[in-house]
Amino acid sequence: MLNNIRVVLSHTTHPGNIGAAARAMKTMGLAHLYLINPQRFPDRQAEAMAAGADDVLQNAVICSSLDEALHGAVLVAGMSARVRDISQEVFAPRVAMSTIMEQAAAHPVALLFGTEMSGLTNDEMARCQFMVCIPANPEYSSLNLAAAVQLMGYELRLAAVKGAVEPGKRAAPELVPAPAEQVERYFKHLEDTLTEIGFLRDKQSTKLMYKLRRLYARARLEQEEVNILRGILTLTTQYHTKLKQKSE
Amino acid sequence: MLNNIRVVLSHTTHPGNIGAAARAMKTMGLAHLYLINPQRFPDRQAEAMAAGADDVLQNAVICSSLDEALHGAVLVAGMSARVRDISQEVFAPRVAMSTIMEQAAAHPVALLFGTEMSGLTNDEMARCQFMVCIPANPEYSSLNLAAAVQLMGYELRLAAVKGAVEPGKRAAPELVPAPAEQVERYFKHLEDTLTEIGFLRDKQSTKLMYKLRRLYARARLEQEEVNILRGILTLTTQYHTKLKQKSE
């Protein structure tokens, strides 16, 4: 299961943190590191901090976009240092583990970490199905990036080991969420259609799209559902186009 | 309870690790750092790595002996990177927490960390009531010192702060699902609209509606979302009517 987990670090400023994160990952049995536009990489400081986890660094996938880093992931969990004024659901690591491990049993899952200074951007958060917030001192919640990776890796390892020990309690029909790029295509389709029918048209639009994203993020759309929803959108547009042509 | 916990670092080699440990401590609400003969301290690297936890560094107690560092502690738990051939009992952090917190409710408790390279000496281990071993990748169990402090601090915080583990709700905007009748009105509206645009038209319809219901049921729609979704439907219908009139 741990092999289906990828750690995605977005726009990391300090190469030392990348190395330390790689080390933290390896100690917990995680191997897949994705870097979105790191400020400096490869770098000697990263190698120094990685210690014996140089293989994790060497196999790191450097991406130029979020899409690239999330390609194929059926679940994206974003890390948040504090509970901000965001629309997503927020869970403590231990609570998030059941959902994460359930998916990671069969599909790629991404843990998305923002920059050291400011965390995830709104656009990055919008791509997450939910946020994970590490319980911390409210007066000083600034965990080092690699420390956050370490804690998440630790919880993942405990969850993975426990899952192997305890017979799984299979609840409800199993949900197989669609990969990130499929969900993203739906949102694009939705936005286009809502613009065409005149629902999105001003500054409110972005906010509305965030709200719609939040709704569907909670549901974690399956591929068939994406197809149904896009089918509705396609028909809406086709119908419009037909009517438009008639009326012209 | 966290106020009764002291983190004791013995003969630490790299001052950066002392700083990073201080930061890790503060993020988890730990304040008492004891240093037994640190190789270099105070040090600029320690300060740099401590970030906003400079107060923990400044209040650090420098000791010249183990006795001094453990003075007053009713319980000493030693950290071990791996289960060695030692006589002490070894617990995973989560298992050790109950004993540690029980004592820390009223008395000073020490967590003893050895050097980066070789961990605790035999003499140091002999002073511990039990050892704590962080579950790690058996092929690479070399956690950074500050990372180990971070993990222990995290477990201590979860154990000490009620509600820190459970959240799910320790979270941002609480989800308030819309009442059933509102959701039902949405489904009726959806069905009507989908019929109008020609998406629902045969025996498949019931099945499709069932699938759409399942999707939105998972999301547990809030009232605002019901309003947004119904707004989209209303606009779709209005738009269609306009186009129809044009085309007639």
Image (cartoon, coloured by chain):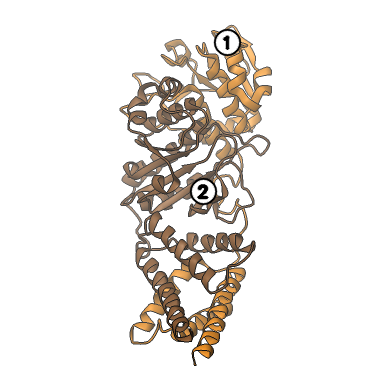
Chain colours: A brown, B orange
User: What's the residue at 40%, 83% (across, down)?
Assistant: B200
Q: Residue B87, percent across and down? A: 38, 19
At a point 41% along the width and 84% down the height, the residue shown is B198
Query: B12 above or below A203?
Result: above
User: Quick one: A138 or A222, which is closer to the camera?
Assistant: A222
Tell me the mark number nearer the camera, choosing from 1 and 2: 2
Looking at the rendered structure, the kind of residue marked 1 is Asp
Structural crowding at the residue carrying mark 1, measured as other residues with C-alpha within 10 Å and reported as few (<14), some (14–19) or many (≥20)? few
Above or below residue B199? Residue A58 is: above
- Left or right relative to B171: residue A43: left
Closer to us: B186 or B91:
B186
Q: Considering depth in this image, is A176 or A196 the residue closer to the camera?
A: A196
The span from disc 1 to disc 2 (Cα, nearest Å) is 50 Å
Q: Residue furthest bottom?
A: B248
**Residue at point 60% right, 33% down?**
B27
Which image quadrant for residue B203? bottom left
Residue A206, percent from left and from top: 59, 59
* Disc 2 crowd, CA 10 A, few/some/many (<14, 14-19, 20+): some
Give the x, y percent position of residue B163: 60, 47
Label 1 sits on residue: B67
State whether residue A47 appears in this view: yes
Residue that label 2 marks? A124
Task: Write down the chain letter for disc 2.
Answer: A
Indicate the secondary structure of the residue bearing disc 1: helix
Residue B31 visible, this orientation = no
